[in-house]
Image (cartoon, rainbow, N blue to C red):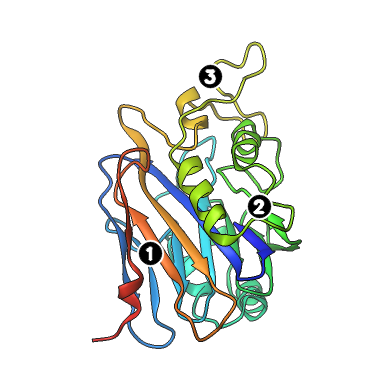
Amino acid sequence: MVSRVDESAPLVVGANRDERLERPATAITVLQDSRPRILGGRDELAGGTWLAVNDRGLVAALTNRPSPGGRDPSKRSRGELPLALVQHTKSEDAVEDFFGRFDPALYNPSSILVGDRRSLFSIDMTGEKPAVVELPPGLHVLENLPLGSPSAKVDNVRRLMGHVDQRGPNAEALLDRLRVVLGDHSLPPLPEGAATGASPQENFERAPETLAACVHTESYGTRSSTIVRVPASEDADMSVSVAHGHPCTAQYVDATSLWKTD
């Protein structure tokens, strides 16, 4: 997420969804008709979403955190969490309500970014309570590790994005850069002896291909990609575009018309 860098678009979100290839999902749909109207992807197996945006300009995106013992199927779906956050109109209200109502022990581990035109927060769902941190303006890259953890993948995405933390790049140039980066296959250099991409933070191993922005493996990869542009004006619709498939080959399709009610 790029927060409060461009005055015309104080929040710009680019997100790839990496998942098992056989898991059924809808890349973009109307998740809620009533106010607030909510758009996002839908997991057709467990329900919920990995990314949701409402008609007031609030966006919530979630990444799963791998566990050494694997996912606990008895726990609630993590896809509930972004939907709960975008029921609010302001990110400050969303995280305050979230902290008081949601118990990380009921869910498998995850990390969340939630923001709007004025602020951006990270939420770590691994402790006794949600760990909420307000983030400064700039570029914030979230993968399957805690935000701020040493990550070759995050470092590579930052390198590809360039100096977007500095004020100056206009929104259109930023969107063009995001499309290129989300479809990029370059792999960061790995330390000697780390050919498997082992993560000491989480004690799990990952295929080297998963360190690219756009992931291709035999059974797992980038299933869809979403770009959201939240304009400065609260009267303007959020721009939403989605690539249904790998963003290296699939065209981004404008989904902004989904804001319109029948």
The picture places residue 131, in percent across and down from the top left corner, at 70, 61
* Helix, strand or loop for disc 2: loop
| Horizontal and vertical percent position of residue 22 | 25, 41
Q: Total of numbered circles in the picture?
A: 3
Single out the residue that lies furthest toward the top. Answer: 193
Residue 12: x %, y % from top left: 56, 61
Kind of residue indicated by mark 1:
Gly
Q: In this rendering, is residue 152 above or below 92?
A: above
Residue at 57% of width from left, 61% of height from top?
171
Determine which quarter of the picture holds residue 4.
bottom right
Label 3, label 1: how far apart the Cα atoms are: 31 Å
> Residue flagged by tag 2: what amino acid is it?
His
* Marker disc for residue 140: 2
Residue 2's spot in the image, x, y percent? 62, 58
> Residue 241 vs residue 131: left or right?
left
Q: First in sequence: mark 2 or mark 1?
A: 1
Image-based side of 116 in relation to 225, left or right: right
Residue contact at pointers 3 and 1, CB within 8 angstroms: no
Q: Which image quarter is the C terminus in? A: bottom left
Neighbour tally class for label 1: few under 14, some 14-19, many 20 plus, Cα within 10 Å: many
> Which numbered dot is residue 196?
3
Label number found at residue 48: 1
Asked whether the viewer can see residue 130, the reply is no
**Precedes in sequence: disc 3 or disc 1:** 1
Q: Identify the amino acid type marked 3.
A: Thr
* In front of the other: 158 or 154: 158
Residue 30 numbered mark, or none: none
